[in-house]
Amino acid sequence: MSASRKLFIKTYGCQMNVYDSERMAETLAAEGYETTESPEEADMVLLNTCHIREKAAEKVFSELGRLRPLKEAKPGLRIGVAGCVAQAEGDEIMRRMPLVDLVVGPQSYFRLPEMARAVEGGARVVDTDFPAEDKFDLLGARPRGRRGPTAFLTVQEGCDKFCAFCVVPYTRGAEVSRPADRILDEARALIAAGVREITLLGQNVNAWHGAAGGLATLIGQLARLEGLDRIRYTTSHPNDMDDALIAAHGHEKRLMPYLHLPVQSGSDRVLKAMNRKHTAEAYLRLVERIRAARPDILLSSDFIVGFPGETEEEFAATMDLVRAVGFGSAYSFRYSPRPGTPAANRPELPADEVEDRLYRLQALIDTQARAAQEAMVGREVGVLFERRGRLPGQWVGKSDHLHAVHVHGPDTLSGTFARVRITASAPHSLAGELIEPA
Ligand code: SAH
Ligand code: SF4
Ligand code: F3S
């Protein structure tokens, strides 16, 4: 095993891919691959890809185009495609892209060491199985080295919901929950490495059923681990927000007051056509119950604009829902037809109309997000400092409500909590002054 080989990973898509990229790097580290920030230095390049919208998937092919001259200059360079595009289009990629040596789906990357050895020997390999084994068990424990104060921890994968627009049930497979003891072991290892905030991840994280009592029970167990100060989870489906989880927002002090709870649309007809299995009214009632448990919680959502058949009135219902809720932040996407999904062949709306709706929705969301930020000015908030800012002596961290906060302070702030008084609100962050280091 030589320690001289270098690995460059580029990550697209959601946080689950960020987590997977970390685990891929760890797996290959055991094979002697050291990660590098520069593709030019690399002996292996892995693209960890996203299939959620057409644009996301296209990026992979343009990135592969950019890698072509690199491979021509360095024939020993191995190129791999991982993640959701690999899962959906693996064989196609192998056919169309001779420069790709390796295709590995999100459920089979624990086999990367043997795959890497095969491609080093000149083979081209594809593995997009959904193996029966739990990939996490096969990946083993996390390495012991020190790391930053925040970490992702995947607790659930896959999705059984089959929203009419979405590729995830096909690229990630059926819902699987990791057992609680494994998650707790991984959390302990992260805490020992310096982590103070863990974000639990799953495509449907609140459908986690690795122990009786569901996600609320798991959060309760994590909240009792010495050294863990903050817990977050994402992404939740409204239909899986059970009473215990809502109540946890009221009594678990370490569960942070921010919740990403995608609703997609405010129109009942569109929600039905999307196969979301809830109404706009049910979502609003759910939001009321969550706010009753934790009045200062900030909510966030995803929206799809221009779903097939969406009328101006139906779009207006989405705008009404946004006004009724008042989001702390939200993401909105132009509908993108995805091959193999039920909505793929439904007639699309005119692009300029969709563009116009997207613009109006984003303007409204922006106003709400700014208002939520401005409401923090003058308040004292807890901040976990993660990294240096661009200015000398500046540090950046996240507040409990997930706002980025900039302060000037000593280097000892790195990786620590401090109380901060918020003094100003900029477009995408807050500025503040240290009150006292925690
Ligand atoms: N599991 C999560 C979302 C995963 S995908 C949930 O159920 O909410 C992240 C977001 O991408 C979705 O919430 C949706 O808003 C958006 N999205 C998914 N498929 C899309 C498509 N075909 N076109 C546009 N946006 C899409
Ligand atoms: Fe996709 Fe719907 Fe599953 Fe979310 S719940 S991952 S949007 S199918
Ligand atoms: Fe994209 Fe796959 Fe995540 S399609 S959003 S990387 S689950």
Image (tube, rainbow, N blue to C red):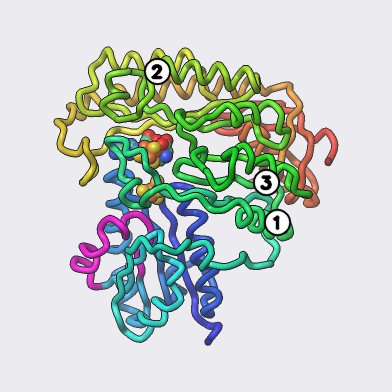
Q: Position of residue 234 (x, y in %)?
A: 52, 40
Name the residue: 48% across, 61% down.
134
Q: Which residues are magenta?
A: 80-98
129 displayed left or right of 301:
left
Q: Residues within 10 Å of mark 3 (few under 14, many from 20)?
A: many
**Residue carrying label 2:** 280
Q: Amino acid at mark 3?
A: Glu
Residue at 36% x, 65% y is 104
Residue at position x 32%, y 39% in the image: 162
Image mark for residue 24: none
Disc 3 target residue: 197
Residue at the image position 42 percent from the left and 22 percent from the top = 363
Residue 421 vs residue 220, the one in the foreground: 220
**Left/right of residue 355 with respect to residue 76 in the rendered view:** left
Closer mark to the observer between disc 3 and disc 1: 1
Question: Where residue 4 sits in the image (x, y, percent)?
Answer: 53, 83
Q: Is residue 328 above or below residue 30?
A: above
SS for tag 1? helix
Mark 2 Cα shell of 10 Å, populated few (<14), some (14-19), many (≥20) = some
Q: Secondary structure at mark 3?
A: strand
Q: Quadrant of residue 214?
A: top right
Q: Which residue is mark 1?
A: 188
Q: Rate crowding at label 1 as few (under 14), some (14 to 19) or many (20 or more) other CA atoms within 10 Å.
A: some
Q: Nearer the viewer, residue 340 or 355?
A: 340
Q: Amino acid at mark 2?
A: Ala
Q: Quadrant of the C terminus?
A: top right
Earlier in the chain: of badge 3 and badge 1, it is 1
Measure the C-alpha gap from mark 3 to mark 1: 12 Å
